[in-house]
């Protein structure tokens, strides 16, 4: 009986995993998949996923880290350390041209009730006019959003998640301005824990971490929790009730190259992961959009138009898996895991 009790206790421990970085800090928003690519869940702000549903092996995926597969039962106290991705871009050299150009690879995953229902990848050209503070993007086909709408996804949310976020870069002028905006508009306070780590909290608790590692600034944010508290505090009852009814969640992870000015602009944007989820009449929908910057330099308007046209000619509205594999290899981007490839293979056989 004692042996059975011990085995039961060990089994219970194996149901929870805690994903940490090289410094031992929890990593939020790590996507956890079964061996066949079914979505188990996403780690919380402390890097914990409390229930892996008894799966023997799981695959872990997040921008900025190397994907890996682990045997859950072999983990000491359910803890696993993810290895940083060695990823950097050449510094943008200042030239007398109006646009900072940033080319990005995006990968879009859509899960319905934890099964992959859609996958797409492509190249998004981005140009930032620093003088006029205007950001432009390449074209993005509405067909992707419409495709998911046919599967039951609520139109406004799927369009927002796929059309407007896929592959597009995020620009924040500085950490100070980001922190001031969060404090003034979203009731968020900043605590500097060390030179390499800060914590952001609202009255409900911790919602974000900022870390500095290997020349990068990374921010993990539970934006849904932040937005919904702000809705409540501002008396925006209708918005709050709609988000609660939809089971709305939004988290993101974003990384920039560190610089002395502490700017978070186009010239040092590196990568991002956006995660959206909500309920609709067919179940629960989850979007994951990975974005990797692959090149950046200065160009003029003529060059900008020519580059957009060239990308469309080379890749069309979406990349094939062979094109994706080749592009990712050339730019040191983690390949799709076997679990993800298996899920995509099932998807292709269904459609």
Image (cartoon, helix red, strand yellow):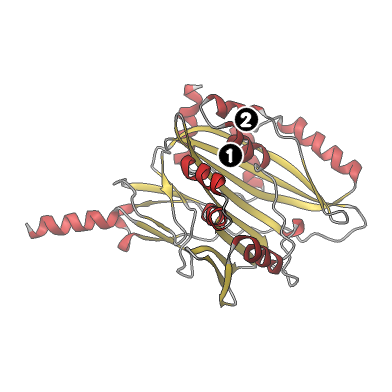
* Image height of 119 relative to 165, above or below: above
- Percent position of residue 6, x then y: 15, 59
- C-beta proximity under 8 Å, tags 1 and 2: yes
For label 1, the residue is 108
Q: Secondary structure at mark 1?
A: strand
Mark 1 residue crowding within 10 angstroms, few (<14) / some (14–19) / many (20+): many
Please give the name of the residue rendered at 45% of the width and 29% of the height, measured from the top-left corner: 282
Residue carrying label 2:
144
Check the image and report above or below for 19 versus 166. Answer: below
Q: Secondary structure at mark 2?
A: helix
Seen as rendered, the residue at the extreme bottom is: 194
In the figure, is residue 129 to the left or right of 270?
right
Q: Is residue 188 above or below residue 162?
A: below
Which residue is at 59% across, 34% downward? Answer: 321
Residue that appears at 87% across and 53% down:
132
Lateral position of residue 171 relative to residue 77, left or right? right
Residue at the far left: name it: 1
Q: Position of residue 124 (x, y in %)?
A: 72, 41
Q: Position of residue 192 (x, y in %)?
A: 57, 75
Task: Give the CA distance from mark 1 to mark 2.
Answer: 10 Å
């Amino acid at each position: 009986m004692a042996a059975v009790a011990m085995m039961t206790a060990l089994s219970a421990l194996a149901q929870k995993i805690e994903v940490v970085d090289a410094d031992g800090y929890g990593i939020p928003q790590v996507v956890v998949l079964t061996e066949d690519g079914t979505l188990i869940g996403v780690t919380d702000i402390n890097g914990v996923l409390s229930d892996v549903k008894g799966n023997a092996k799981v695959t872990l995926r997040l921008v900025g880290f190397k994907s890996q597969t682990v045997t859950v039962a072999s983990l000491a106290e359910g803890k696993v350390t993810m290895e940083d991705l060695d990823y950097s871009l050449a510094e943008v050299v200042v030239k007398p041209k109006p646009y900072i150009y940033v080319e990005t690879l995006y990968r879009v995953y859509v899960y319905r009730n934890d099964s992959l229902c859609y996958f797409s990848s492509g190249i998004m050209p981005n140009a930032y006019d620093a003088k006029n503070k205007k950001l432009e993007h390449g074209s993005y086909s509405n067909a992707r959003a419409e495709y998911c709408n046919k599967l039951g996804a609520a139109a406004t949310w799927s369009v927002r998640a796929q059309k407007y976020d896929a592959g597009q870069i995020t620009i924040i002028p500085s950490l100070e301005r980001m922190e001031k905006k969060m404090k003034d508009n979203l009731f968020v306070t900043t605590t500097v824990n060390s030179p390499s780590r800060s914590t952001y909290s609202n009255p409900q608790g911790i919602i974000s971490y900022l870390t500095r590692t290997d020349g990068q600034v990374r921010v993990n944010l539970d934006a849904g929790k932040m937005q919904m508290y702000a809705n409540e505090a501002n008396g925006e009852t209708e918005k709050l009730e709609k988000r609660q009814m939809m089971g709305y969640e939004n988290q993101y992870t974003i990384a920039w190259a560190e610089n002395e000015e502490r700017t978070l602009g186009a010239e040092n944007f590196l990568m991002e992961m956006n995660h959206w989820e909500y309920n609709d009449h067919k179940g629960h929908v989850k979007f994951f959009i990975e974005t990797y910057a692959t090149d950046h330099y200065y160009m003029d308007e003529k060059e900008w138009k020519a580059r957009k046209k060239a990308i469309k000619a080379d890749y069309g509205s979406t990349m094939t898996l062979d094109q994706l594999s080749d592009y990712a290899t050339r730019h040191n981007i983690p390949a799709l895991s076997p679990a993800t490839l298996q899920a995509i293979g099932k998807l292709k056989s269904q459609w």
